[in-house]
Image (cartoon, helix red, strand yellow):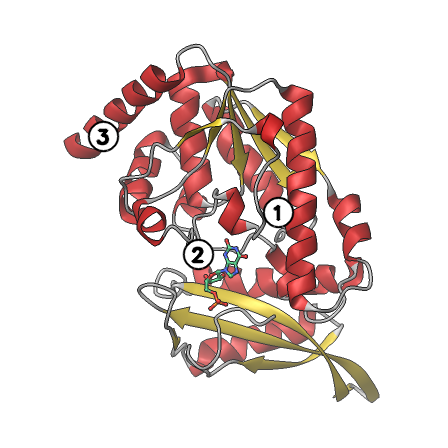
Amino acid sequence: DWTAEHIIDELIADVRTQVGDGRVLLAISGGVDSSTLGLLLARAVGEKLTAVFIDHGLLRLGEREQVEAALKPLGVNLVTVDARAEFMAALDGVSDPEQKRKIIGREFIRAFEREARAYGPFDFLAQGTLYPDVIESAGGEGAANIKSHHNVGGLPDDLAFKLVEPFRTLFKDEVREIARLLGLPDHIRMRHPFPGPGLAIRCLGAISEEKLDILRRVDDIFISGLREFSLYDGCSQALAILTPIQSVGVMGDERTYSYTAALRAVTTDDFMTAEWARLPYEFLATMSNRIVNQVHEINRVVYDITGKPPATIEWE
Ligand code: XMP
């Protein structure tokens, strides 16, 4: 594809002109924008790039390993930071969703600053800002946009880097095409959006390792199932939610008192409004069976049939 190849060459030349011999810091979220930017910058400036991936313990099953396996072999100088314990401690006992978001944002900035100082000094901060983020300026769901992504005010003055935003003129589809040419695996390249606060906002009420582990297993069954039955690409976003509702069920001869999991899948063009995805009943039946058979902490599975508005896509 001549056009995208040409754009890649141009972006690389522009980045080199802008940063010269400077060192560049990038936060990797695991989404398509920041991952693609990591690949592009690795080509443009090589070891002058440090990409930091903070594992806040709120990622999905195998996500950290997938990101590492995708980026490291393609030459991205990737630092993975295990910040799980700090995030868990900060979120201990917190059930209010806005509080959770604030804490996660604050902890993210704290961890990111620490790594910036440890590996620095840096001259530039790279962000995967897309054209729609620029016109909205609120940031949208641009996965690498630290400010909007984590709902916090940004970095302190001594870490006030110059910004490198090579994707400022691009749309998501164009980034996906660039990602393909740079060799980003399809499971990341075509991935549904995933919120910065991760599973914390899909685990309703106060979170715990145990609850996150349950949610991770449910989510993995659902998302793997969508891929297996070729339904993934037809949805704009799909997610599992762990509700705090416990109810009576029956398993063999025994009465159970276990959690309710919710599944949600939507179609949308812009994530501002959305329709619930009309997934086949047979598929939903298969998912429900797999979940209750494999995740013993769950005895009830519901599917969300609400549009946005009035509901949001996430449950929080
Ligand atoms: P809602 O739930 O508001 O979500 O309908 C709309 C889209 O935004 C995503 N989302 C986020 N993305 N950081 C993000 O990067 C966040 O804090 C955040 N909160 C919601 C959500 O997954 C959906 O795609």
Residue type at mark 1? Gly
Q: CA distance from mark 2 to mark 1?
A: 16 Å
Closer to the chain start, of discs 3 and 1, is 3
Instruction: Tell me which residue sits at (58%, 68%) in the image.
Output: 240
Asked whether 12 or 5 is in front, the reply is 12
Instruction: Tell me which residue sits at (63%, 64%) in the image.
Output: 201
Q: In x, y percent, where is residue 310?
A: 45, 82
Question: How would you rate the neighbour count of disc 1 (Cα within 10 Å): few for under 14, some for 14-19, many for 20 or more?
Answer: few
Mark 1, residue position? 62
Under tag 2, what secondary structure?
loop
Residue type at mark 2? His
Q: Residue furthest left?
A: 2
Asked whether 284 or 315 is in front, the reply is 315
Asked whether 145 or 152 is in front, the reply is 152
Q: Are marks 2 and 1 in contact (CB under 8 Å)?
A: no
Label at residue 207: none
